[in-house]
Amino acid sequence: MRKLLLTLFCVSVPLALAAPGDDLDFTVIAPQEKKAEEVKTPSVMPTDGEGCYVNDPRINNLAAVLDSIESGEDIDPIKVKIGTYLEFSSTYIQKIGQKNVHIVTEDCASYPTELGDLPFKIAMNFNEVYNRLISAIQDKDEIKARFIARNVISRPIDLAGVMSLLTLNEIDKELAAEIRKYTSAKPVKDNSRPQDVERGKYKTYLIPLDLFRATGGKVTGDNLEIGLANFSLGAACSGMDSSAFYTKSQLSTGWLPGYRNRDEPVIRARSILKSYSIKVNEVGCRDYLKQAGRL
């Protein structure tokens, strides 16, 4: 069953030291439901634009293109932007023939898709990478999922963007396994007891920042540091019941109550941050709440 994976980043949280001051928009719309038997020609795509970086107008009359191909006629490759290519169903890609579909880039180069790999990766905003990859996996569209994983790279973000992606999104176990099949992202479990895990008594979550890392995303900025309010066992922290990452203007969102420094979600998050050379400064939760004016 499909789930709403990402809804809205940059949520204002009462414990934050101040309201987030950035205007980054990481809103992500969940993939739309599709009927399994429904295979339609892609809706009308815009073909306007400047210079050569436009969609081939023939994409709005694919029936004629298919007639030409089926009659044995050699056609000039259809050149489309990568976002448009990813709107095509694999059924149509196969009917047209991957050799007949080329990706056009902003510098007017075009590359065939038949090899499965482009000569270089094309940058896209992470929200689009996320939605398209998850949608392809859920649709069991291996051609498209593999193409995205191998040929698309997420555009860089800054530290505020990092904080926006430090959330937990619940996913089912099958989707978690498929994400690991196509990327190096590692969904985490909410239960680390071996006997419970063996019985399947756990929920799985994806940290979006992990998928951002797995799709080649970079973090910009100097002297990158994030705080970690460490909720340790026995600590009396009224108004706070889990460890939480924070900056001076923002508290991470989406952490379920009860997650602490020793739990897999926090351990995985720390590992991802370390891979970006982001320093994590730990303080006790009481010290954090004092800084935030909550105690």
Image (spheres, rainbow, N blue to C red):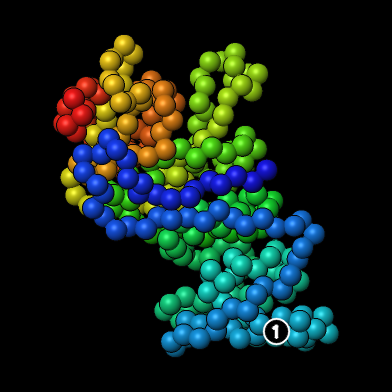
Where is 232 relative to 242, above or below?
Answer: above
Q: Is residue 267 visible?
A: no
Residue 28 drawn at (x, y percent) = 48, 55
What residue does disc 1 label? 61
- Left or right: 131 with respect to 95? left
Q: Is residue 116 visible?
A: yes
Q: Crowding at label 1, few (<14), some or many (≥20) Cα neighbours within 10 Å?
A: few
Of all residues shown, which one is farthest toward the right? 71
Mark 1 residue type: Asn
Residue 23 drawn at (x, y percent) = 29, 58
Looking at the rendered image, the quarter that the N terminus falls into is: top right
Q: Quadrant of residue 17?
A: top left
What is the total number of numbered labels drawn onto the structure image? 1
Residue 248 drawn at (x, y percent) = 20, 41
Q: Quadrant of residue 25?
A: bottom left
- Left or right: 3 with respect to 28? right
Residue at left offset 33%, top offset 13%: 233
Residue 208 drawn at (x, y percent) = 45, 44
* Dot 1: element: helix
Of all residues shown, which one is farthest toward the top? 234
Residue sitting nearer the eye, 4 or 47: 4
Residue at left offset 56%, top offset 62%: 117
Looking at the rendered image, the quarter that the C terminus falls into is: top left
Residue at left offset 68%, top offset 65%: 89
Residue at left offset 70%, top offset 58%: 34
